[in-house]
């Protein structure tokens, strides 16, 4: 499981940090920083590395080209397609918490238990259902829009 640092732990570190130690603080804690322009990119890559999943496999599974997928991950291009980010997280076998954090870092709403469609996606992730067609079937069965785009 990826190590997480709670905000209060980072606050404690900052209490003992002098101005000349800021570079070191940022370097050591960059993966926990939310205001960093590339925060999503580093977080996404860290989670995939931990799970030993290749980015090109994520792109393929999520149904996007490698070039477009890499532009989205690096945030060189910004998408408003929340489902695309969720599909990429599912392709990377992200947990519910990891998916929510990725969405938040990308500037999107986290998975929300009170939203019927999000609840279906949460249940799929919690039950380790990482096949998009199975998640689509679950969503359709519950009267929700599927997660894959219509072609």
Image (cartoon, helix red, strand yellow):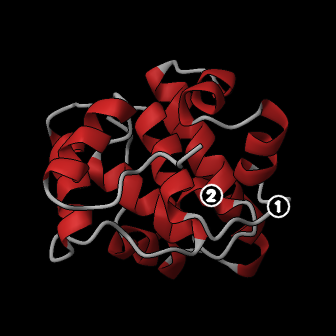
Q: Residue at x 47, y 32 (%)?
A: 91
- Residue 77 image position (x, y, % from top left): 82, 61
- Asked if residue 135 is positioned above or below residue 143 in the image, the reply reads above
- Asked if residue 50 is positioned above or below residue 33 in the image, the reply reads above
Q: Residue at x 45, y 70 (%)?
A: 10
Left or right, 90 with respect to 128, comes to: right
Task: Residue 145: name its quadrant.
Answer: bottom left
**Mark 1 against mark 2, which lies toward the viewer?**
1
Residue 97, numbered label:
none
Q: Quadrant of the C terminus?
A: top right
Query: Residue 10, can we see it?
Result: yes
Check disc 2 and report its element: helix, strand or loop: helix
Residue 77, numbered label:
1
Q: How far apart, in angstroms, are the residues tagged by discs 1 and 2?
A: 13 Å
Q: Which residue is at the front of the view, 108 or 151? A: 151
- Residue 52 image position (x, y, % from top left): 51, 18
Q: Residue at x 15, y 77 (%)?
A: 114
Query: Residue 33, can we see it?
Result: no
- Residue 58 image position (x, y, % from top left): 58, 30
Q: Residue at x 34, y 75 (%)?
A: 8
Count residues near mark 1 (Cα–Cα under 10 Å), then give few for <14, some for 14-19, many for 20+: few
What residue is pinned by disc 2?
40
Q: Quadrant of the N terminus?
A: top left
Check disc 1 and report its element: helix, strand or loop: loop
Label tally = 2
Closer to the chain start, of discs 1 and 2, is 2
Q: Which residue is at the front of the view, 42 or 93? A: 93
């Amino acid at each position: 499981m990826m190590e997480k640092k709670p905000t209060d732990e980072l606050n404690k570190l900052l209490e003992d940090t002098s101005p000349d130690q800021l570079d070191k603080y940022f370097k050591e804690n960059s993966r926990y920083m939310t205001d960093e322009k590339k925060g999503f990119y580093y977080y996404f890559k860290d989670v995939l590395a931990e799970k030993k999943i290749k980015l090109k496999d994520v792109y393929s599974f999520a149904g996007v080209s490698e070039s477009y997928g890499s532009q989205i991950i690096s945030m060189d291009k910004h998408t408003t397609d929340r489902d695309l980010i969720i599909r990429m997280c599912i392709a990377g076998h992200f947990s519910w918490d990891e998916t929510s954090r990725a969405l938040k870092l990308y500037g999107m709403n986290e998975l929300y238990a009170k939203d019927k469609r999000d609840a279906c996606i949460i249940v799929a992730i919690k039950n380790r259902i990482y096949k998009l067609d199975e998640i689509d079937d679950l969503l359709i069965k519950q009267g929700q829009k599927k997660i894959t785009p219509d072609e």
